[in-house]
Amino acid sequence: MSERLDGLKQRLGQLSDLGHAMSLAHWDQQTMMPPHGGEARAESLATLTRISHEMFVDDETGRLLDQAASEVNGADPDDDDPRLIALVRRQWEKARRVPPDLAAELARAASVGQEAWIVARERGDFKGFAPYLERNFELARRYVDCHTDSGEFECPYDALLDDYEPQLPTREVSDLFAALKAELVPIIARLSDADPVDERPLHASFALNGQRDLVSEVVALMGFDRSGWRIDDTVHPFATRIGGGDVRITTRWDEHFFPTGLYGAMHECGHGLYEAGLPRRLRRSPIGSTESLGMHESQSRLWENMVGRGRAFCTVLAPRIAALAGGELSDIDADTLYRAVNRVKPTFIRVEADEATYALHIILRFELEQELVDGTLAVRDLPEAWGARFQEYLGIPVTDDKEGVLQDVHWSAGLIGYFPTYALGNLIAGQLWERAHTDIGDLENQLATGELGPLREWLRQRVHRHGAKFTTAELLAREAGGPMSVTPFTTYLKAKLGDVYRMDLN
Amino acid sequence: MSERLDGLKQRLGQLSDLGHAMSLAHWDQQTMMPPHGGEARAESLATLTRISHEMFVDDETGRLLDQAASEVNGADPDDDDPRLIALVRRQWEKARRVPPDLAAELARAASVGQEAWIVARERGDFKGFAPYLERNFELARRYVDCHTDSGEFECPYDALLDDYEPQLPTREVSDLFAALKAELVPIIARLSDADPVDERPLHASFALNGQRDLVSEVVALMGFDRSGWRIDDTVHPFATRIGGGDVRITTRWDEHFFPTGLYGAMHECGHGLYEAGLPRRLRRSPIGSTESLGMHESQSRLWENMVGRGRAFCTVLAPRIAALAGGELSDIDADTLYRAVNRVKPTFIRVEADEATYALHIILRFELEQELVDGTLAVRDLPEAWGARFQEYLGIPVTDDKEGVLQDVHWSAGLIGYFPTYALGNLIAGQLWERAHTDIGDLENQLATGELGPLREWLRQRVHRHGAKFTTAELLAREAGGPMSVTPFTTYLKAKLGDVYRMDLN
């Protein structure tokens, strides 16, 4: 390593070490920390964020970037080092626009807001939660204001979205979502007239120990390995990489609904595989991390829905679910299971939504948070706006904030601009799924025998190994044959749901 | 808060927040982290340590100290702020005498030494370990040299001891240990002629679930509370406070020896109560923390030995141990249990030693490490010196370095000057125990019914609430009626062991 690059890389390594400590603090807060530890944790996270932010935005980082840039002059711009410098310079310029006080305040409010959300959700108390939410949106507006003069973003929401999905304008997301909604609404309408599928396989009594064993077996097939992974219980499941060789996933359980545990775990394990598949040569480097949450979500949704709810893997799952449930379900077959886990039915909770209605939950949040940021919607009016739009998109009335606006942790934790990446993940997953079938001729047969390694390795080659070297648009152009698109996902969905409901949805 | 003090307190608060992150990283490493996470964890901890050290020794800290000092001029020197300034100035001056290169080298050698120790202990290979130990003692001597010109310490070892037991001269420890040894040796000699006690209650089969339930019940009586505490399994038990409202203890279990789990947990819970009892108004402040390891150990030993192995609490434990063991032990009574858990027998391993022989293990280490620091003993001659002194003090021949000089992690990790605080803890516990009986007339009756709250509150008032405002000597003068002393501990011990062995030890 050249000396001129070394200075930059050392500094970025130290920032990665601080990130390690922050990831651990977040993981611990949601899995291990006793309730009274929240206040001190918020302060510690605020300080770590502040130190990290100050170290990053410092003039010295700019000097190191300049020095490093002069070193890589003339190199292939797609090499690691030029890519690193370009990525970091963009992040550095964006971060420098945010005063350290605001950065620390964002972190503190996020941590405090999360604790308040836990209490509020339990009590269904939106009023008690509203001040925290107001604070988070106020801070988000101040954050947006920092970027106005840069001319980098087309609209206020762009600056927020960019933190989760770099360099994707809100305008493109709106267009994609409009096209997606136009496809989904008629599908959902057609299915509402179809004969309902047999849902009994979902709602039996599933002993928790048996569920845990099943999940252990399935995530092990996917690539979970105790020497470098953990799985724990939590309220709102997530996956995180603390550092190299230390990936942690979480799940929750429902004794009377196995998909909560199983598909939740497959989802988070999909995220975990992305983190575990990052290149070792780039550890402690920003380009050795994951930057696009849309790409991240594509990994989780692909494993959860396309593999886990696919006809092929249902042949692996069926005997295990049958054994778990026993009783009248003891002879459930793969087709019955496949149809049950893919039933389409509008429900209140996003994370339990089926593949057809899921995006509508997201589009609703995407629209509402833009209005909350713009100030065209006030926080106190949010439950009403939520209810009205929910009725319009999903056709069912929200009567309890617990099943409405209080269901997600995101806004409480200051994650504003994050939601659209979930639906983008479905679209990207559709593109990768199509390409994987082209590249791996035998894919469906492999999945039907529980042989998940080749798909994992394919994803590692196509996606994971690149880390954050490319934007989502660049990566899709290189590895999936074109720009982000609705068609592969809706084609997949229509084929699957047509199969499940025995009708032609094209 | 005045503006001039505010700057200092903010900086110290941030250092406390970094400490929070480091405590969590250490706790996680020993309880949760998957094995492959170690490399990234070491890097993260090194960076956090470096940042924290640099922030503390910076000139700016001195400027803030000066500014703060001018503010509290004329205040009662025992008020929080003058005490804070005095404590931090002393720590700052000491830390600044150590060049950053030496500080980094100490940390690195400690980490490398620990890894070497793990291998050496497993193999019983002192020769392979010796170079690491030599390096650690050489660095300790260089550390001592940094402080020579300050005129603050009477002898080389003082500068080391001071890191663990601030402002206590080696000379005083030597005098105390000489007096203690003079009392203990004849007791142990007398007991070696006594009829042995019935040890069967210790060695039955104790189901782990039952042990966990018992420990949960006992630590709850002590004050463990799930809203602000955790208990987890680990290999080498410890207690830590991550931050306010977040105390974590750990224990290990032996299915055939219940004291490992139960008394280990009571010991760590004693440490935890000290941390949990620190004053809320001083959180994130160095004087709201614990500085004296002797005082800390007094809390753990008091709960483990004086409460947990006391006749009164054995009446609470006996029926529970009987139920746990079942079989032929199902009718074990309090007296039999009491005698068994207090049996005296020289053994090789310090952490398994009884209350009478324990201090001899410490005195031996205290003497040897002084000689190693002075250079009057060479590392290569250590096993021989250890063996000779062990035979002299404990009357049994060491034949295996695993059970001798390789048993403790401390020296390998650069913790030189740490050992004496363990035995000082016993002495302080003796003083507090005596005073508690004066202050709480009904104490023994309370303990016999499992009512542990009044003792805990008494300790909070006498010790915990002061945090690090006072040195151990100052605190004992204020709250226990006099300077550190051997007599209360040996008086307690002679009464107890006389009771256990049915003989007059006075």
Image (cartoon, coloured by chain):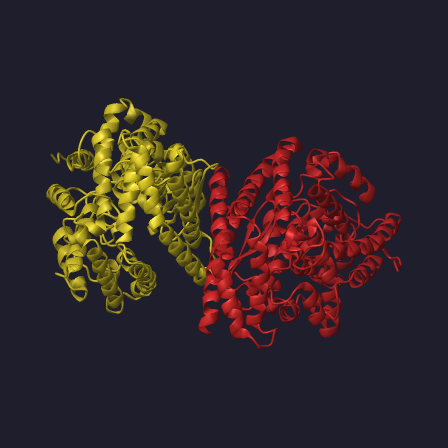
Chain colours: A red, B yellow
Residue A7: percent from left, percent from top: 45, 66
Q: Residue shown at 24%/54% (left/top)? A: B416
**Picture quadrant where residue B437 is located:** top left
Q: Nearer the viewer, residue A292 or B218?
A: A292
Q: Residue shown at 33%/40% (left/top)? A: B67
Residue A254: percent from left, percent from top: 65, 45
B231 w.r.t. A458: above or below: above
Question: The C terminus of chain A lies in which quarter of the figure?
Answer: bottom right
B319 w.r.t. A243: above or below: above
**Picture quadrant where residue A77 is located:** bottom right
The answer to whether any part of residue B380 appears in the image is yes
A451 w.r.t. B192: above or below: below
Residue B417: percent from left, percent from top: 22, 51
Q: Nearer the viewer, residue B387 or B115?
A: B115
The answer to whether any part of residue A278 appears in the image is no
Q: Nearer the viewer, residue A453 or A381?
A: A381
Residue B44: percent from left, percent from top: 44, 58
Q: Residue shown at 38%/43% (left/top)? A: B12
**Picture quadrant where residue A369 is located:** top right
Q: How many badges with numbers are in the image?
A: 0
